């Protein structure tokens, strides 16, 4: 058996692509649009793990409430510099819900409220302003 991808429903494809591509550094590997099915699928991958993909699904014109339930859990990415990654996302206007106080782990949420865990490759020493920053909201 081979693991292929995880699917995340999105409300605003451009906002989601900004978060995942510009914010996290994933790249779009393929896209499919279905006029008949009224949906767009966009597959994203990280250069280090090209076989693992995230499928963003936009259902055209849907008013369905995807809710904020925590039944999905989260996506996780290993990063080379957690402080730089969090600062980049913060500068783009995203809230770092669980700052990397320990130099190892942080959480941020996508525009569609998907929790994303960032894990430092190895550990970095605690660093301000992150070390004393409180949690914000949910993740």
Image: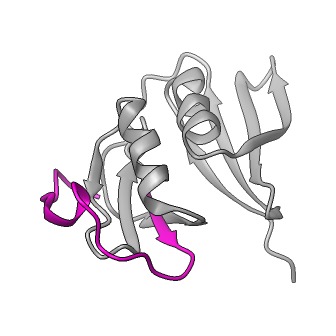
- The image quadrant of residue 133 is bottom left
Residue 120, above or below 118: below
Q: Is residue 98 left or right of residue 124?
A: left
Residue 41, above or below 99: above
Quadrant location of the C terminus in the rendered image:
bottom left
77, 113: nearer the viewer: 77
Quadrant location of the N terminus in the rendered image:
bottom right
- Range of residues picked out in magenta: 115-139
Q: Is residue 51 left or right of residue 84?
A: right
Q: Residue at x 43, y 41 (%)?
A: 89
103, 95: nearer the viewer: 103
Q: Is residue 117 left or right of residue 134?
A: right
- The image quadrant of residue 124 is bottom left
12, 76: nearer the viewer: 76
Q: Position of residue 2 (x, y in %)?
A: 86, 77
Q: Residue at x 59, y 41 (%)?
A: 20
Q: Residue at x 75, y 26 (%)?
A: 37
């Amino acid at each position: 058996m081979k693991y292929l991808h995880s699917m995340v429903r999105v409300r605003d494809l451009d906002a989601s692509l900004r978060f995942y591509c510009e914010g996290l550094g994933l790249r779009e590997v393929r896209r499919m649009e279905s006029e008949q099915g009224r949906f767009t699928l966009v597959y994203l991958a990280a250069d280090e793990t090209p076989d693992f993909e995230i499928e963003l699904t936009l259902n055209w014109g849907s008013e369905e409430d995807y809710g904020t339930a925590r039944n999905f859990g989260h996506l996780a990415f290993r990063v080379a510099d957690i402080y730089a990654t969090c600062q980049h996302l913060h500068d783009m206007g995203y809230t770092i819900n669980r700052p990397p106080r320990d130099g190892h782990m942080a959480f941020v949420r996508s525009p569609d409220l998907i929790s994303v865990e960032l894990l430092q490759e190895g550990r970095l020493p605690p660093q301000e302003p992150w070390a004393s920053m409180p949690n914000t909201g949910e993740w």
